[in-house]
Structure formats: structure tokens, C-alpha cells
Amino acid sequence: MCSSDLIQAAYSTLRGKGLSGSTLQLIHGVLHKALDDAARWGLVIRNVADLVDAPRRSTTEAAPIQTAEAIRLLQCAKGDELEAFYVIALTTGLRLGELQALRWREVDFEQKRLRVAATYQGQSAGEPVFAEPKTAKSRRVVHLSDIAAESLRTHKNTQRERRLRAGAAWVDY
């Protein structure tokens, strides 16, 4: 078995273990670069990764939620502390990180719209990390439906009450 066959067999084994095409493509990129460097340094005669077809990225088509499912979800979420989150997610199409980064200053109740100005990146030392959206197109204004605006209004009032009860212990994120 030649080296390129070994690489192809390794990709097949990894695929069989559940790795996605996107992950395999990343692995291929690292291997290809390492072998390029080795060839440049005279450690190998040629880059055998050139003989292997690079794995294809996995592209899964997102299945949109059906109307009946959305209605059921909203019924189940009624009264939940994350109800507004679900309503905004369903009615605006914002990405998870954009939803998690929303601030009240970005919401315009009069015009029924919100501005996507940040995205949640995770935590560092127990503190949330926010960043600007990656592209100019991602920084946008999103119009709110009546149900979304009302849900946010209710959530803001509930949050205000919780903040008063919590006093100095309130954490603003």
C-alpha cells in the first residue's frame, strides 16, 4: 500500500468514527502543509497528500421549523423565563451568539426593531466575552413582529423586578 493509499484509508477510518467532512478537510489541510514543509526541507521526496482527493466539507441543509412546531414551542415556552429568547429566535432568525449578546440599548420599542451589534464568544475568567459581528452584513437592523416586541417588553419589566429584588447581587448579563 503506497502512502497516498494510507492517507485515504485513514480518512475513511476517521469518517467511520463519525468525524465530519469539515473536520476531515481541516485534518487534510494540516497534513498537506506539514508534508509541504517536509518536502521543502528535503525530508521527503514529494508531498503524497497531493495525490489524495481532499475530503469535502459537510454541508447539511438546515431544516426550518414548521409553523405548527413553532406554535407548539411558543405555547410550551409561555411563562418560562426564557420565553422572550425563544420568541426572538423564532421570529427574527438571529444566530445563537447574536441572541446571547442582545442588550436593551439595542432594542427600539417605538420603531419595533433591534440592532445586531455584537455576538457572544463564550467566557473568559468567568466573564462573558462579546465581539463585533464578523462582517458588515452581520451588523444589521432587524424588525420585530408585534409578538416579539411585546415579549421583549414583558421580559424587560420582569427583569426590572428581578433586578430590584436582587439589589447589589444583580449581575447584568
Image (cartoon, grey):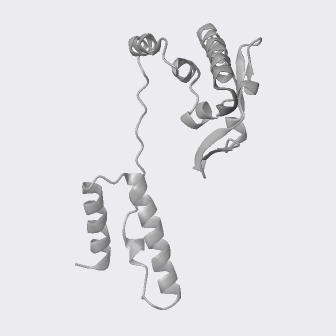
Compare residues 14 and 76 and report the one nearer the observer. Answer: 76
Q: Which residue is at 50% across, 73% downward?
A: 33
Q: Is residue 154 left or right of residue 23?
A: right
> Where is residue 107 shown, x and y percent of the image?
72, 21
Residue 166 position by quadrant = top right
Q: Which residue is at 38% across, 77% downward?
A: 48
Q: Is residue 5 left or right of residue 114?
A: left
> Where is residue 13 shown, x and y percent of the image?
25, 62
Count of all numbered marks drawn on residues in the image: 0
Q: Is residue 18 visible?
A: yes
> Where is residue 109 shown, x and y percent of the image?
73, 14
127 relative to 72, above or below: below
Compare residues 28 and 134 and report the one nearer the observer. Answer: 134
Residue 168 position by quadrant = top right
15 relative to 61, above or below: below
Q: Quadrant of the C terminus?
A: top right
> Where is residue 127 shown, x and y percent of the image?
63, 46
Q: Is residue 172 visible?
A: no
Residue 35 position by quadrant = bottom left
Compare residues 121 and 48 and report the one nearer the observer. Answer: 121
Q: Which residue is at 76% across, 13% downward?
A: 111
Q: Which residue is at 29% across, 67% downward?
A: 10
Compare residues 113 and 103 and report the one nearer the observer. Answer: 103
53 relative to 157, above or below: below
Q: Quadrant of the N terminus?
A: bottom left
Given the current orientation, which residue lies at the most extreme left position? 1
